[in-house]
Image (cartoon, helix red, strand yellow):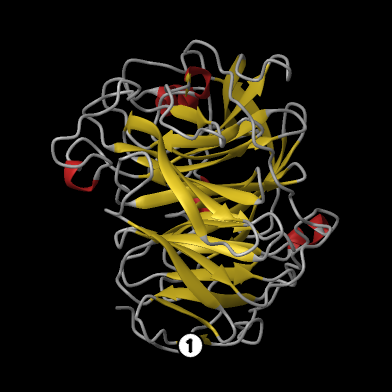
C-alpha cells in the first residue's frame, strides 16, 4: 500500500497558460505552488470495506465483478480498463468497457470452461474485448450486461465518438494493433468493425471532435508519437489521412523536457503507410520530424480543445498534461502541468473532464493509486484511493448529468459507480455523445 503521508500539490502549474482562460477548461495557471485543495470535497475517509476511500458524503456501488454472469451467457472478463458512458433508451445509461486481456488470459477472459469464442470474434485465441453494462439512469443500479466485441488484444483505453465507443488495442501481434468502433446499442456480441485508417500501432486512447470528425490518438510507447486522423470529408469520417504531430522549426523534438506554459506552434506530417506489417508507424513519423512523447495515454476533449497526458514525461518522469489547441493545419501545444516527483504524482493514465469543468486523472503507479482532481483555479485534490490493492484505477468517466462517476479497479476486477454531492453540470460541459451505429465499411 502507498504510505499515508501529507501530500503537497502534485502538479507544478505553468504561468503562460493563463492566456487560455477563454478556453472551456479555464484553469488559472498562476505561477505558484498550488496548495492541495483538501477542502474541495474534504479529506478521504477510510473505507470500512477496504475497497475505495472517498470524501465524506460520497458512496460507491459495486456494479460488476470479474467472473460474474452476464445475461448473454458469457462471464464478466477481468482487467476492466478504459470506459465510456452513453445515454440509452428507456431511462438507461450504457457503459462500454474495455478489458485489457491477451491470448494467455483465458482464465480471466469472457469464456467459461468448455465455452468457445463466438463466430463474431475477431481472433478466437484472444481474450480482450469490450462489454456493455446497462444501468438505470436515475438510481445507477445494474440492469444487464453483455459482450459486444470479442477476440481483440489488450484493449486498453479508447474514447467516445459520434458512432459509439472507440476501443484501442495496445498490442501489435499479427492482425492486431487497431482501433475498433462499438455501437452503444449492441445488445449482443457484434462483428468487429476495424478502423484501419486510424493506424496500426500501440494504441492507448482516442477522442473525436464531433464538429470536424477529426480523431486524436495517443501511443503508449516510450518513444511514441501523437496522431490525428483527418477525414477528407467529415461526412465520410473513416476515409482520410493519418498524421503525426510535429513542432514547427524543430525535428523529432522530445516533448518530455518541455517547460511549463510555453506554447509551441505545431504542424502535422502525413503517415505514408498507416497499416504496416511491422511496428513502424512512429519510426516513419519521426523520420519526417514528428515529436516524441513518453507514453501518451489518457486523452479528452472539450469544445475542440484537447487534453492529453504522457505518463512518463516531465522532470520526474512521472507525468505531463498537455493542452492542444488545434487549427486547420496546425495549432499550438503546451505543457500545462507536470509532476515534480513521484510523491506528487505517479503515472497519470486515464483522464476525463467532469461536466462542470474540472479535470480528473487516474493514476497507474507502483505504490498505490489515487483518483485526482484539478479545480478550475488550478488547485489539486484527492478524490478517491484504491484501498483494496496496488492496482491502477481506470475507465474514469461521468454520467452526462454529472451525478455519478464511474471507475474500474483493474486488477481487482471491479466496476464502481460513485455518487455524492458533485457540483451541478455547468456551461463548460463537453456534452453527451449520442448513441449511434458505426458504419466504418471495409478495413
Residue 424 drawn at (x, y percent): 77, 68
Where residue 47 sits, quadrant-wise, is: bottom left
**Residue farthest toward the left in the current orientation of the protein:** 114
Task: Depth check: give the residue in front, 88 or 307.
Answer: 88
Residue 220 visible somewhere in the drawing: no
Secondary structure of the residue carrying numbered label 1? strand
Question: Looking at the image, which residue is at 32% across and 58% down?
Answer: 413
Q: Estimate the x, y position of residue 407 in percent, counting from the top left.
A: 48, 61
Name the spot of residue 432 as percent of width and height, x first.
71, 47
Question: Which residue occupies the foreground of this view, 284 or 75?
Answer: 75
Using residue 7 as the reference point, say whether residue 156 is left or right of it.
left
Quadrant in the picture for residue 137: bottom right
Mark 1 sits on what residue? Answer: 45
Closest to the observer, 238 or 162: 162
Query: What residue appears at the point 32 percent right and 15 percent down from the top-left corner?
Result: 277
Q: Residues within 10 Å of mark 1 (few under 14, many from 20)?
A: some
Which residue is pictured at 81% across the width and 53% down the height? 23
Relative height, residue 425 to residue 96 (above, below): below
Number of numbered discs: 1
Q: Is residue 328 left or right of residue 86?
A: right
**Vertical comparison of 179 with 258: above or below:** above
Does residue 51 appear in this view? Answer: yes
Amino acid at each position: 500500500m502507498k504510505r499515508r503521508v501529507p501530500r503537497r500539490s502534485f502538479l507544478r502549474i505553468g504561468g503562460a497558460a493563463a492566456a487560455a482562460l477563454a478556453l472551456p477548461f479555464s484553469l488559472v495557471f498562476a505561477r505558484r505552488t498550488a496548495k492541495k485543495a483538501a477542502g474541495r470535497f474534504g479529506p478521504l475517509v477510510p473505507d470500512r470495506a477496504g475497497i475505495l476511500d472517498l470524501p465524506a458524503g460520497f458512496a460507491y456501488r459495486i456494479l460488476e465483478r470479474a467472473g460474474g454472469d452476464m445475461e448473454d451467457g458469457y462471464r464478466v472478463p477481468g482487467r476492466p480498463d478504459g470506459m465510456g458512458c452513453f445515454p440509452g433508451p428507456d431511462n438507461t445509461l450504457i457503459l462500454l468497457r474495455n478489458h485489457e486481456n491477451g491470448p494467455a488470459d483465458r482464465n480471466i477472459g469472457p469464456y467459461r470452461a468448455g465455452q468457445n469464442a463466438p463466430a463474431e470474434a475477431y481472433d478466437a485465441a484472444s481474450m480482450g474485448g469490450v462489454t456493455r453494462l446497462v444501468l438505470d439512469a436515475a438510481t445507477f443500479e445494474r440492469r444487464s450486461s453483455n459482450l459486444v466485441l470479442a477476440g481483440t488484444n489488450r484493449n486498453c483505453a479508447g474514447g467516445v465518438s459520434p458512432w459509439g465507443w472507440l476501443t484501442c488495442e495496445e498490442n501489435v501481434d499479427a492482425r492486431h494493433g487497431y482501433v475498433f468502433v462499438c455501437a452503444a446499442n449492441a445488445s449482443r456480441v457484434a462483428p468487429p468493425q476495424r478502423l484501419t485508417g486510424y493506424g496500426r500501432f500501440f494504441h492507448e486512447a482516442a477522442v473525436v471532435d464531433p464538429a470536424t470528425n477529426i480523431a486524436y490518438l495517443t501511443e503508449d510507447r516510450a518513444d511514441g508519437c501523437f496522431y490525428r486522423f483527418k477525414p477528407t470529408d467529415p461526412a465520410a469520417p473513416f476515409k482520410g489521412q493519418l498524421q503525426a504531430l510535429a513542432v514547427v522549426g524543430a525535428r523529432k523534438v522530445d516533448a518530455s523536457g518541455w517547460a511549463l506554459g510555453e506554447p509551441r506552434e505545431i504542424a502535422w506530417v502525413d503517415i505514408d503507410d498507416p497499416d504496416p506489417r511491422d511496428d513502424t508507424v512512429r519510426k516513419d513519423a519521426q523520420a519526417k520530424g514528428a515529436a516524441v512523447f513518453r507514453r501518451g495515454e489518457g486523452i479528452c476533449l472539450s469544445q475542440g480543445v484537447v487534453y492529453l497526458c504522457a505518463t512518463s514525461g516531465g522532470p520526474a518522469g512521472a507525468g505531463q498534461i498537455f493542452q492542444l489547441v488545434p487549427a486547420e493545419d496546425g495549432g499550438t501545444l503546451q505543457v500545462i502541468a507536470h509532476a515534480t516527483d513521484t510523491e506528487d504524482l505517479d503515472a497519470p493514465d486515464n483522464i476525463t473532464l467532469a461536466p462542470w469543468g474540472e479535470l480528473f486523472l487516474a493514476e497507474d503507479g507502483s505504490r498505490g493509486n489515487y483518483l485526482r482532481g484539478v479545480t478550475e483555479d488550478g488547485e489539486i485534490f484527492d478524490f478517491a484511493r484504491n484501498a483494496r490493492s496496488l492496482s491502477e484505477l481506470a475507465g474514469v468517466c461521468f454520467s452526462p448529468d454529472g451525478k455519478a462517476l464511474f471507475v474500474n479497479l483493474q486488477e481487482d476486477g471491479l466496476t464502481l459507480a460513485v455518487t455524492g454531492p458533485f457540483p451541478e453540470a455547468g456551461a463548460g460541459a463537453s456534452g453527451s455523445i449520442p448513441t449511434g451505429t458505426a458504419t466504418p465499411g471495409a478495413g
